[in-house]
Image (cartoon, rainbow, N blue to C red):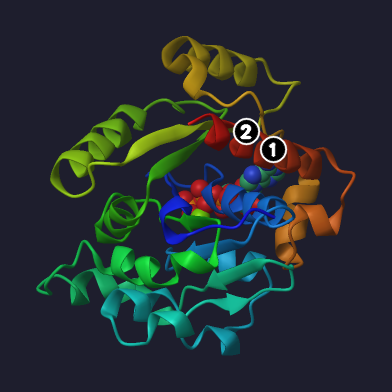
Amino acid sequence: MSKSSSTDTQIIAIANQKGGVGKTTTSLNLAAALARHRRVLLVDLDPQGNASTGLGIAYDDRKRGSYDALMGESEPTSLPRPTNIAQLDIIPANADLAGVEIEMIDQDRREYRLRDVLQTVEGLYDIILIDCPPSLGLLTLNALVAARSVLVPLQCEFFALEGISQLVRTIERVRMAFNADLCLEGIVLTMYDKRNNLSALVADDARNFFGGQIYDTIIPRNIRISEAQSHGQSVLDYDARSTGAMAYKALAAELLNRLKRK
Ligand SMILES: Nc1ncnc2c1ncn2[C@@H]1O[C@H](COP(=O)(O)OP(=O)(O)OP(=O)(O)O)[C@@H](O)[C@H]1O
Ligand SMILES: [Mg+2]
């Protein structure tokens, strides 16, 4: 495993304000696949807490989490907790996260809260992934200010590209106002159904529009992926030979390759 200093930790926000496009599924399965090669931290920044549930984190183990990170109420190093997967830690979402955007509204440095916390713990990890909620509010803003890059899951469905230009504009604005280093890591096509012509059309459209920013790896629609989540497991642990598991392993390999080339 490579040794990292705090300066070469990659912090990647997984974001798309559209709901149900595969942000959480990509966050947790990519994190699990990357953890086979690197030390990984997953931050669950969505009040729905799906990434925490999908990795089998019990509610009792969520007393401290991303709410405390944003409110500055706990020592940052006390926030990450281990998962059942070696080399993968998580800062889970706790219940109070649902109201945190309103609580933070009149606070100082409200856009930098997550960045401040991650700067304290990043030396412990090679890669930090942040699962964002389906909005461009203060939670996602905290992720974009803390991150080096943004990975965008794009569902191969109707209206997939709608909203992407708004996301790209948001990244641009965050870069100008808060985080000059922020870039688009890439776009991952998710829930690809090879029996559905629409999937192929969306993939072609996306490639024509975004070219090399679209990852070569495509995540297929695969029932094992959603079953795994309901068992609190990554698809790699739930069914290592499924097309879903192989796709997320390939995505991790492609991401590591692209990071090397930067
Ligand atoms: N490749 C896939 N194959 C089959 N089911 C999938 C796949 N990817 C995601 N799903 C399922 O689709 C649903 C939405 O996925 P997910 O929760 O990852 O999206 P999301 O973008 O995080 O949603 P939200 O915007 O609500 O946070 C989930 O039930 C998930 O299990
Ligand atoms: Mg989600």
Does residue 194 lie above or below 166 as drawn?
A: above
Which image quadrant: the N terminus?
bottom right
Side (left or right) of 232 relative to 168: right
Mark 2 surroundings: few (<14), some (14-19) or many (≥20) residues within 10 A: few
At x 49% / y 88%, what residue is drawn? 63
Residue at the spot of label 2: 257
At x 66% / y 42%, what residue is drawn? 252
Near-viewer residue (234 or 20): 234
Q: Quadrant of residue 245?
A: top right
Q: Give percent across and percent down for residue 202.
A: 54, 18
Does residue 185 lie above or below 20 as drawn?
A: above
Residue at the spot of label 1: 253
Mark 1 surroundings: few (<14), some (14-19) or many (≥20) residues within 10 A: some
Q: Quadrant of residue 138?
A: bottom left
Q: What amino acid type should be assigned to the residue bearing mark 2?
A: Asn
The single residue placed furthest to the right in the displayed view is 241
